[in-house]
Amino acid sequence: MAVIISMLRGVNVGGHNVIKMEELRALYATLKLRDAQTYVQSGNVIFRTDERDLAAVTKRVRGGIERKFGCSTDVICRTAAEMRDVIARNPFAKRRGIEPGKLLVDFLASDPGAEARANVLRIKIEPEELRIDGRELYIYFPNGQGQSKMSWAAVNKALGTPGTGRNWNSVVKMLEMAEKMEAAE
């Protein structure tokens, strides 16, 4: 049975798309997704499923959220193995002085392709640093994300695929939760 980490985009941010986590866990149960656990209030759900087609799971969750909560949100899924790979590929891992709370991983719905990756890397975002690898965008905000002048609209337009960001501490914690769930099988 696979352990999946799903991340919802734009949930419980600024009073929009408000979803209570206990109701979200209950929804996942009705969708035949087992042992759903949530992490923080931004729509991170770790669960088990026998389903092998992640695209089908993503579509089912998105449809369930629209029916139950009346809001449309992007749902990005990664297996526990994929999340381990995301952590292993961190381009900032060997660099000293990187603060985990200032490192963001933007999980993309699909691989944007070589041309889109090249276009994103041409965007001037200093002092932020951006690296892209497959379906993940790693962004380091040395002065914190709240101080950033980076244009998310320009980045999203260049990518051409939706994504949702999580700080490094959340990425690590979600993997820990997924690995505990895997170990309990």
Image (spheres, rainbow, N blue to C red):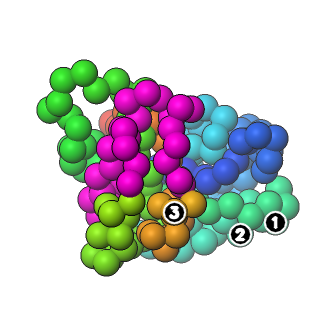
Residue contact between numbered discs 2 and 1, judged by CB atoms under 8 Å: yes
Pointer 2: what residue? 63
Q: CA distance from mark 1 to mark 3?
A: 31 Å
Q: How many other residues sit within 10 Å of disc 2, few (<14), some (14-19) or many (≥20)?
A: some
Residue 4, percent from left and from top: 45, 52
In the image, taking residue 58 as reference, residue 26 lies left or right, namely right
Name the disc covering residue 67, or none: 1
Give the vertical position of 152 relative to 43 (above or below).
Answer: below
Q: Residue furthest left?
A: 94
**Residue 27 in view of the camera:** yes
Asked which quadrant contains residue 44, the reply is top right
Earlier-in-chain disc, 1 versus 3:
1
Residue 77 position, x and y percent, is 48, 58
Label 2 element class: helix
| Residue type pointed to by label 1 | Arg
Label annotation for residue 42:
none
Q: Quadrant of the C terminus?
A: top left
Viewer-side residue, 104 vs 25: 104
At label 3, the amino acid type is Ala
Question: Residue 152, percent across and down?
Answer: 54, 54
Q: Position of residue 127 (x, y in %)?
A: 36, 38
Q: Tag 1, which secondary structure? A: helix
Q: CA distance from mark 3 to mark 2?
A: 28 Å
Label 1 close to label 3 by CB (< 8 Å): no
Local SS, label 3: helix
In the image, is residue 122 part of the stretch drawn in magenta? no
The earlier-in-sequence mark between 3 and 2 is 2
State the residue at coordinates (63%, 69%). Answer: 60
Crowd around label 3: few <14 · some 14–19 · many ≥20 (10 Å): few
- The magenta segment is 124-152
Q: Quadrant of residue 23?
A: top right
Can you identify the residue that label 3 sits on? 154
